Amino acid sequence: MNLYATLKRLCLISSPSGREGAVREEISSIISPFVDSVSVDSLGNLIALKKSRTEGAKKVMLCAHMDEIGFIVNSIGEDGAVRVGTLGGIRLAAASYTKVISQRGVKGALCANADVQPADYKADTMYIDIGAKNKREAERYVKIGDTFVCEPSLSKLCFSRVCGRPIDDRVGCAVLLELAERLSGVELSFDVYFVFSVQEEVGCRGSKPATFAISPDIAICFDVTATGDTPSAKPMACALGGGAAIKIKDNSVICHEDIVKALCKVAEAEKIPYQREVLTFGGTDTSSMQLTGCGAMAGAISIPMRYVHSGVETCDMKDVAACVSLAEKYLLSL
Amino acid sequence: MASEEKFDKDIENIKFQLQNEIIKLCSIATVSGFESRATEKVSSMYRDRLDSFYCDAVGNHILLRSCGRKDAVKIMIDAHLDEIGFVVTEVLDGGFLRIANIGGIDRAIIQGAEVTVLGDETLHGVIASTPPHLKGDDDKLPTIDKALVDVGLGYSKEELEKIACVGTPVIFDKTYTSLKNGRLAGPSFDNKACGAIAICAVTSLEPSELAGDVYITLSCREETASRGGAYLCANRISPDYAMVIDVNLANAPDVSERESVPMGEGISISYSSSTSRALTRECARLCKEGEIPFTPKAEPSSTGTNAVAVNIAGGGVPVVDVGLPLRNMHTYNEIIALDDCYSLYRFIRAFVTSRELAEGFAREEGEI
């Protein structure tokens, strides 16, 4: 498996929160050969299980979310302008004046009302121009409740950096797929659940019932994190190219210290580049896995990323590779 | 006369004991998210007085005092163990650490505060402050994620990283002062004072006196994870009924009377949509019968405490929310009144010994 090729394949399939079917099918077909069973729960989470031969084995849950931020159509004006609400934390200033595409493949331009300044952009002062002259024309292509996303793309920048969208969190999915392949011939003494969750961007919803059903002993999340290495960034000791980020804290979770220590120890021993991550904003599925049912020991391996939730999300493939290696060696150390 | 004097002396003794136990538990560092670090210390303090002691995967500490009877009701008493603090976000040259807050801390109170950095080695530090001489009139306080701890010159970044890497918790120094009239000032009374009182009260009783098995949950992450820790505890224990104890904003000059409770006049009992009306009514009755002073407090939608989470855990738990009045919340000099602590102690004893509660709130077999 080529990590970049997998990432690109996943990025180019749109998957707004609540409408993750297409990406789920793709991931399901890639992971099937590497695991013992694949199932989809009632919310749409994809759960791939690699069973151990041990009776009553411990359970490790690895989770990356399949959904991405997007828009949902809530009304269509007489002038044919398609009005939308947001799904997840859209940065409207970043999304404005870019091309968007609906679940039916209808393209449009996301624009702001002419009398609104970028600082005041809100969803209800934006509209999608799909090229329709009036409401009737627009309704032939768009229905209330249709979803739109900013156009997907992925390109290589200098060195090992890649840029596009939605790297958040297809990169986490790609890491899990690569990991599943690497572990496919390996006997482990515990069950591994690869969970591709839905609706993370709208409040870490999908991972809750998945965790409840699995009831894992250890839960590790794979998602992106911010960096402090761009002009005027918030202070943060995390940089692109600095290696896998071992999460200590974000705004939704404080990771179990033993998991943090174990991950750092593995990284040191295996000489995998890593950095300790304290994110003072944002949340991840780590929190919902930690706090469901009777609770789980939770941690996260994060992929450092610049410009999160924009069309130019930027990662370093070396960091991505480090995340895969760290996860692999950690599991082998258990 | 003589017996009354002895009675007063007994009360003073209990208050003195409560003060000691409160300071002992509050002195243990339990920064939200790092509660598991305290397991050894908490366990060694209480294990001998309990039937079981358990720390779960997240950092909840569950203490069981059993009544010794089969099929007894399960009574849960929750007081969160975690406290506010800081975490190192960046290690700088020259003996400085950048920190961010864990839990709600007012940036106005932190400059110049003494702190302890809980790294591989314990370091003392002071939160850096800009002297007034160097400030303009309009200079605003720096945001809390820009705060710096000065641990003393002489460290290079690399040296300091070995002792206190990114992710190391930091706490306000623990100094306790007795004020007049049995008032106590210091950090972390929120909420370990309540936990310490609960343990004292429950373990002061003989098992046969208990109306059921009592689970004291010193739950984790109240300050940071929307009360998730207590929710996990209630899921695990599945209690018949529960009491959540937390500190409550106490009245002082310039504090809105409507949003606070009087200090030194007993505990507060919340009337809220996230608590059980029936259980709350019974608790008010217990107070009246036992002449335990209390103030009813209307909190229409939410108590803002773990009661919200315990109430909806498992199949639903009847819960009462009880408060210990406290001033200067989330500072290093919170103030509590030992009179109130004693009222809380008495109320908890009444709660866990009440046969009426055990009968009235026992969940029936197969109840939907």
Image: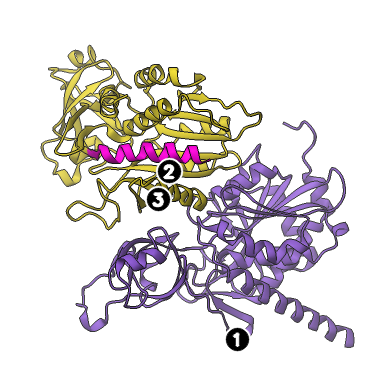
Estimate the spatial distance between the alpha carbons at disc 2 and disc 3, rounded to whole Å. 17 Å
Q: Nearer the viewer, mark 2 or mark 3?
A: 3
Q: Nearer the viewer, mark 2 or mark 1?
A: 2
Q: Give, as a three-letter code, the residue at label 3.
A: Glu
Looking at this view, is A118 or A137 the one in front? A118
Q: Which residues are magenta?
A: A314-334
Judging from the image, mark 3 belongs to the subunit labelled A
Q: Position of residue B24 (x, y in %)?
A: 63, 72
From the image, tell me which residue sits under label 1: B180
Are there few (<14), some (14-19), or many (20+) residues within 10 Å of tag 2?
A: many
Q: Colour of chain B?
A: purple
From the image, tell me which residue sits under label 2: A300
From the image, tell me which residue sits under label 3: A268
Residue A329 lies within the magenta run:
yes
Task: Decide: is A97 above or below B279.
Answer: above
Q: Nearer the viewer, mark 3 or mark 1?
A: 3
Which residue is pictured at 40% across the width and 50% down the height? A268
Q: Position of residue A230 (x, y in %)?
A: 19, 51
Q: Give, as a three-letter code, the residue at label 2.
A: Ala
Estimate the spatial distance between the alpha carbons at disc 3 and disc 1, rounded to whole Å. 54 Å
Residue A114 lies within the magenta run:
no
Give the side of residue B246 with respect to residue B203, left or right: left
Q: Give, as a three-letter code, the residue at label 1.
A: Lys
Chain letter, yellow in picture = A
Q: Position of residue B290 (x, y in %)?
A: 79, 66
